[in-house]
Amino acid sequence: MRFAIFTSMGGTTWNDVLDLWRHADQPGGWDAACVTDHFMPNTPDRVGDMLESWTALAALAGLTTRMRVGTIVSGNTYRHPAVLAKMAANIDVISGGRLICGMGAGWQENEHQAYGISFYTVGERLQRLDEACQVMNMLWTQDRSTFKGRYYQLDDAPLMPKPGQKPRPELMIGGGGEKVTLKVAARWADHWNVWGGPDILARKGKILEQHCAAVNRDPKAILRSAVMVPVISEDRAQIEKAQQTLMKRMGRDEASAKDILLAGSVAQIQDKLGKLGGAGVGLVFIPTMFLGKDGRAVLDTLIEKVAPALRKA
């Protein structure tokens, strides 16, 4: 199993993000790091600093050397996929072939309203994501691309230089929608990501495998990753508080929140991650926005005490 951090671009500064990523990039440290893609807080007043993800990622790609770097996940509605394919290829070159191009359908309505970006229906956003993946794949892998889709068109379009990774950058699809999102992942993804623990990933993983069978794709060709929230403590009150925070902030029910929480002693956390690996998961993301002021200490404990046993497994 590999380990990654998931860094919010909100409520932070460029220097703090850079310091954290440089710390995580040290030898023996984290395997990957990704940034969120939003323009403003998801609050009624819309007030708060929010670093732009792809421009920040370009700098981070040039200032790190070892970790894979990427987005978790980039909203497809924010940028034309041909433009994003060009941006992603450039960052893959800058990073020496370390990009994880994480893509999702887009969900945060307030920023669409604020910037005049069409929000569409859920169904159309997902259809657009499916077409966008096709557009990006064509541009990354073909000398010239022509595409006449319902939402996007290409006319003998080149993309040079090509990405550093061959045949394309690692394309990650984020989301757990079982009828459409997992179908898009089965068709296009090198990597599928969702919030969840062993129970959620086992159940949704089986559905992903069904979609893979429908398109004659080997499900083992798709890396599976989970986002989990750590609480390195055996204090039941502390764990319960974290669970309630997760339920309120993400609208999760009790069972889902318990599954997502990576709580307990080092040994208990290792046991739960072992079960996660048994569900076919090869990478776990830790979201820094839930860690509080001692976030770096939590991350160091995870990578120094929890990860070694799982990396050997």
Image: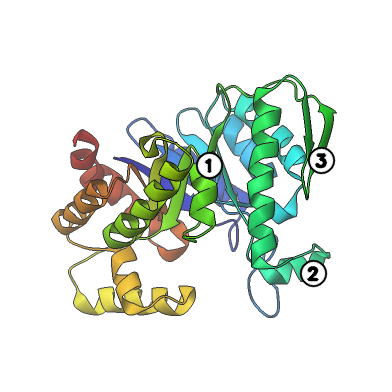
Q: Residue at x 70, y 37 (%)?
A: 135
**Can residue 50 be spotted in the picture?**
no
87 to the left or right of 256: right
Q: Residue 118's spot in the image, x, y percent? A: 79, 63
Residue type, label 1: Arg
- The colour scheme used here is rainbow
- Whichever of callouts 2 and 1 sits on the residue coming sooner in the sequence is 2
**Can residue 210 be spotted in the picture?**
yes
The circle drawn on residue 114 is 2
Q: Which residue is mark 1?
A: 187
The circle drawn on residue 153 is 3
Determine crowd level at label 2: few under 14, some 14-19, many 20+ residues with C-alpha closer than 10 A.
Answer: few
Query: Quarter of the image holding residue 43?
Result: bottom right
Q: Nearer the viewer, residue 250 or 133?
A: 133
Verify CB contact (< 8 Å) between mark 2 and mark 3: no
Verify CB contact (< 8 Å) between mark 2 and mark 1: no
Q: Nearer the viewer, residue 215 or 298?
A: 215
Q: Quadrant of the N terminus?
A: top left
Q: Is residue 197 above or below residue 306?
A: below
Q: Residue 107's spot in the image, x, y percent? A: 63, 65
- Whichever of callouts 2 and 3 sits on the residue coming sooner in the sequence is 2
Residue type, label 2: Ala
40 to the left or right of 165: right
Q: Is residue 121 above or below residue 164?
A: below
Instruction: Give the structural element (helix, strand or loop) at label 1.
Output: helix
Q: Residue at x 19, y 73 (%)?
A: 235
Query: Quarter of the image holding residue 11?
Result: bottom right
Residue type, label 3: Gln
Instruction: Give the structural element (helix, strand or loop) at label 3.
Output: strand
281 to the left or right of 102: left
The circle drawn on residue 270 is none
